[in-house]
Amino acid sequence: MTSAPPLNLLDEALGFLSGGGGGGGRMILVEDCVETTGAFILHHLLKRSLSPHSSDVVVFLSFAHPFSHYDRILRKMGCNLVMQRDNKRLLFFDMLMLDRLDRDKGKTSADLLLALYGKVQKAVEVCSSPVDTRRITIIIDDVSLMEVDANGSTNLVLDFLHYCCSLTAQFGCSLITLNHDDVYSTMDRPTLLLQLEYLADVVIKVEPLVTGPATDVHGQLTVLNKGLQDGPGKSRNKVNNFQFRIKDSFVEYFYPGNRS
């Protein structure tokens, strides 16, 4: 039996236990920008959820890339998505393909999202049955493209996300979403972004360095944990700030000035 994967600063900021999966019952929002992508965080959380030290299941809704894209990246990280899919630990919905096929049948955006939620709900209920107590993580890549897919309807996207959030409360599953912060840079108060930040238990902001590009540091992370219990009837927010460097098969996390 192999040893549990070591924790890094991101895992510690998210409150993972050594070898644990996606952190049940929470919504994690990853916000990035054109200059600094946050896709590597989704890849990390996907790999952690599919760890051999857990029996967790991932429902992955991809509006951004086909399955081959994630499989290629995760293989470099030591995770075989084809095997995980065959073992029913990964349920992958390629919305690039499904959306095209269903629209040819005359279905509307509302029809498509409602049908998609039905499939997600069924998967969660099956994994939460008395004979199958595995935790399930729902990953959406990405919300801004879901909004495009819904013909710009913020309400449809928010309804879908509210439904998914109800699953985290009812079944203890997790919801992880990626959204692009700079998509809304020309808007005063973007409803979707504000609602996402309100719904999320954890907000991870991926940003470029304030001092500009650097060869050995690729960006900085701010991890906001909301509503942590701090005694009876008390809660608090916790903020962690650190930097990162993306390598071929893993990511280094470190505090400013402490990169080894």
Image (spheres, rainbow, N blue to C red):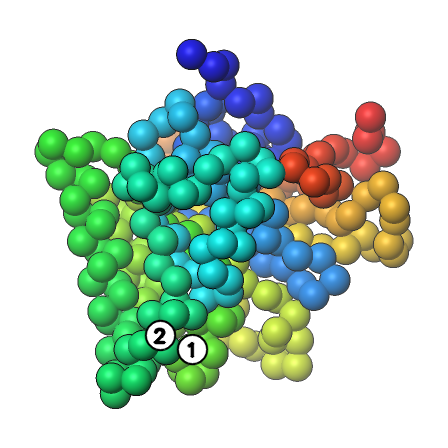
Q: Is residue 217 above or below residue 64?
A: above
Q: Residues within 10 Å of mark 1 (few under 14, many from 20)?
A: some
Disc 2 + disc 1, Cβ < 8 Å: yes
Position of 234 compared to 221: left or right? left
Say which quadrant the N terminus sits in: top left
Position of 212 compared to 146: left or right? right
Q: Which residue is mark 1?
A: 149
- Which label's residue is closer to the chain start, 2 or 1? 2
Residue 256 spot, x, y in % from top left: 81, 37
The residue located at (62%, 53%) in the rendering is: 38
Q: Amino acid at mark 1?
A: Asp
Residue 130 spot, x, y in % from top left: 11, 33
Helix, strand or loop at disc 1? helix
The residue located at (78%, 48%) in the rendering is: 218
42 or 98, which is in the foreground?
98
Q: Amino acid at mark 2?
A: Asp
In this rendering, the label closer to the viewer, 2 or 1: 2
